[in-house]
Amino acid sequence: MSKRVVITGLGVVSPNGMNVPDFLHSIKNGISGIKYVPLFEELKFNCQVCGMPEFEWEQLRNYITETSLYGLKGKGIAFGIKAALDAWMDAGNSIVSDETLYETGCVFGSSVADTDVIKNAINRVDAKESKKLGSRVVEQIMNSGVTAYISGRLGLGNKIISNSSACATGTQAILMGYEYIKYGMAKRMVVGSSEYVDSYVFGAFDSMRVLSRKFNDQPEKASRPMSISAGGFVPGSGAGALILEDLDFALARGAKIYGEILGGSNNSGGQRSGGTMTAPAAAGVVRCITDAIAQANIKADDIDLISGHLTATIADKQEIQNWSDALGRRGEDFPMVNSLKSMIGHCLSAAGSIEMVAAVLQLEHQFVHPNINIEDPNPEIIDLITANNLPTNMVNKDINVLAKANFGFGDVNTCLIISKYK
Amino acid sequence: MDRNAILNELKKVLTPYTENKELLNGITEETDLIKDLKINSANLVDIIIDAESAYNIEIDFDSAEKMYLVGNCIDVILDKMNQSA
């Protein structure tokens, strides 16, 4: 028998907010976290802006032990620790437990291990100084570094999994955690993802000519999903985390319940029929969304809000077309749609989890966050779903069901359906 | 440098790896790094790296294996300092 799965905790490290209350304020008010980076100009990048959380190591002081903090250099790991532990505490738990929590696991994703830490290892080894690397490098360059830190700090004893699925990583982590609880394998899961885009990862994307380059002098305007002047995405960094629980487990401990995950789907277009390494096959995306709707046991008409992937590339138009085809809805009948990337950029593997935190907050507080930088919407998108469904200011609205999707390199798709808990 | 001076210097090297700093106040040559100071055994290599840099010495594998009591650490450090002098 399958279990109901509810969301009981949220944590976020975002370019426009280092905690949930600040993040909520920013997304309600359309506050951008995109800034100009002088180093990127020096490095001759085409894109010289990014979304970077205002992180300082001191912020981790009360999160991990002093000996653990000493020697921690990986920022992606640091973002993940902060978001996950904030979510854990938001769910009403204390960090320190003497016992191993065998009923609780963790699925936390990332796309690359910290390249700053790897660079240090490369430099040392090449200088024939590998002896000086010490004991703390391996744990930070292994892809499971972030889950190892989180689960170790919290004493988690169920499945501990580090997933990686490019831009679909975050939503995939949430879906995996949901499924483990749904099928009775765990009572509670810490799920999410983190990303630290340093110059090396950034440079590789820049070379692909997929990044925004025309708004370096107006950073807050640079991320423009669904705009006719969108010219590529703006990389962002950060982390998002959620605590998922078996409904009965949550009720038994009197937990605050933000909402329920009704279902989801994770698939691939197989890099066939238009799908490639970098572009999703439309048929795969449509199938992912319709499968998620079927899994959630809702109707397409029940969806009140779409939190899209919508990165600000030429793919935005196709994504809206895919949603329209999957839902069988268009024009005024299409639900409202928004892209958090307009404010924080595309946080790659962290995108799905940060956007999911935003989705849960919109459900909890019954609003639709604005799409900023869409004063010149793509007319083909408007033709399909009308301008009314692309709010540019916050809209107070009854939201019962929300669909969240992300699509990643490798033609991987994830869609989640969440609702208010009733 | 006498043993007491090295012990005091060593205390600084051990500080970042000792979670409960109060334990460092009472260290003697008999203090066990892992059992008494609760230092994570993986961090012994970091302590060796830091000691090498603090005293400008090189500590080989065989010597490193002896460094589990504070007194052993002082023995090895003194020995290496004398070698390089």
Image (spheres, rainbow, N blue to C red):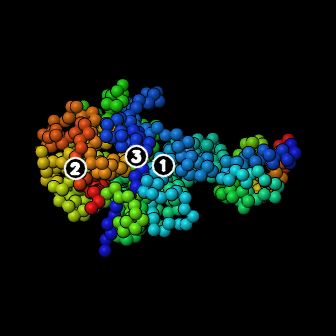
Q: At x 33% / y 69%, what residue is drawn?
A: A3
Q: Provide the secondary structure element on which disc 3 rests.
A: helix
Q: At x 71% / y 46%, what residue is drawn?
A: B50
**Crowdedness near tag 3: few (<14), some (14–19) or many (≥20) residues, C-alpha within 10 Å:** many
Nearest the viewer among A202 and A62 is A62
Mark 3 highlights which residue?
A: A20
Give amino acid for label 1.
Lys
Q: Residue most toward the right? A: B2
Q: Earlier in the sequence, mark 2 or mark 3?
A: 3
User: What distance separates the C-alpha of mark 3 from that of mark 1?
Assistant: 11 Å
Mark 2 highlights which residue?
A: A398
Chain letter behind tag 3: A
Q: At x 45% / y 63%, what residue is drawn?
A: A105
A295 in relation to A239, above or below: below
What is the quadrant of the N terminus of chain A in the image?
bottom left
Measured as percent of width and height from the top left, residue B24 is found at 74, 51
B17 in relation to A187, above or below: above
Mark 1 highlights which residue?
A: A82
Dots 3, 1 in contact, CB < 8 A: no
Give amino acid for label 3.
Val
Nearest the viewer among A244 and A255 is A255
What is the quadrant of the C terminus of chain A in the image?
bottom left
A123 in relation to A179, above or below: above
**Crowdedness near tag 2: few (<14), some (14–19) or many (≥20) residues, C-alpha within 10 Å:** some
Q: Earlier in the sequence, mark 1 or mark 2?
A: 1
Residue A223 visible? The answer is yes
User: What distance separates the C-alpha of mark 2 from that of mark 3?
Assistant: 21 Å
